[in-house]
Amino acid sequence: MADPLQLDGESSNSLLWRSAGHAAEWLTSGLNLPVELRLTQNRVSRLSVRFKSNRICVRMREEFLHATPAFWRTLKKFLADRTRLAWSALCREMNAFPLPAPPTLPRKPFLPLQPKGDFHDLTPILKEINDSWSWTTPSPCITWGPHRRKVRATQTIHFAAYHAEFHLIRIHPILDDPRIPNGFLSFLVFHERLHAELGREQIGCRFFHHSPRFRMRESEFPNAAHWRDFSRSLIPLLLAPRVETRSSLPPHIPPP
């Protein structure tokens, strides 16, 4: 097929693909296997490639349809060569192509904030974390999450979360229990404080919330490995069936 790339205009990012199928047809030309191209809005993996016995599966952000001719030629070269050197060149082309910032969806703010629970006060815990380590970003706010009377069946549970749009750390209210040690809550707050400090990190073509640099910083917390094991031992107990609510912990939890 005719090459639709503007070979004489490298500075232009105009790319006359009629559709993903049109781009896939161009990528397939000259290869031994057909290319299956799917467009996504994945914010973690900008592009992924899987080589199968009967086809090559490419998934990419839809914005790449408007990437530079150099990007598309580099992608095609990687599909043909399948070498680490070709992949590195493709990553450089991807990183040079700016993607639009993800839209910030309107969300109901967590107001009023409730850092003081029935058994644990999160404010001094956060203050101790801020005072004991060096940070380059302002301290986020902190609160216990809301109690819910009914909980849908789920396969996982999030003990804590950092909400960048509100610069807020939220801790699951089920942990406001006298049997939960302060050290575990401090570890959770430290973990989320790191998210506020480091954000997500790009490595190659992917974005990581828990990058190697994040894990290295997390390991600075005293007994970090012990508290990670403690959290894993809690999860199956918290996911056990309840009569009405998960507003309280099961009768038996592992010792800290």
Image (cartoon, helix red, strand yellow):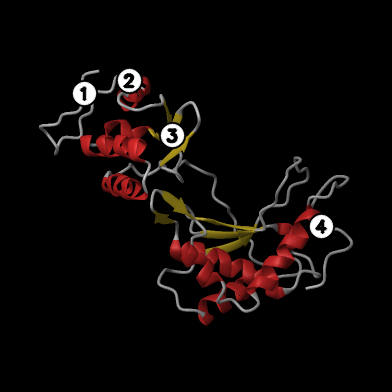
Mark 4 lies on residue: 248
Mark 1 lies on residue: 4
Mark 3 lies on residue: 59
Q: Are marks 1 and 2 in contact (CB under 8 Å)?
A: yes
Q: Check disc 1 and give the amino acid type.
A: Pro
Q: Check disc 4 and give the amino acid type.
A: Ser
**What is the distance, in whole Å, between disc 1 and disc 4 at their CAs?**
62 Å
**What is the distance, in whole Å, between disc 1 and disc 2 at their CAs?**
10 Å
**What is the distance, in whole Å, between disc 2 and disc 4 at their CAs?**
56 Å
**What is the distance, in whole Å, between disc 3 and disc 4 at their CAs?**
43 Å
- The quadrant in which residue 115 appears is bottom right
Query: Foreground mark, 1 or 4?
Result: 1
Q: Residue 116: percent from the left, percent from the top?
A: 67, 67
**What is the distance, in whole Å, between disc 1 and disc 3 at their CAs?**
21 Å
In the rendered structure, find residue 22 and report the number of the disc placed on it.
2
Q: Are marks 1 and 3 in contact (CB under 8 Å)?
A: no
Please determine whether, in this image, residue 94 is positioned above or below residue 197. Answer: above
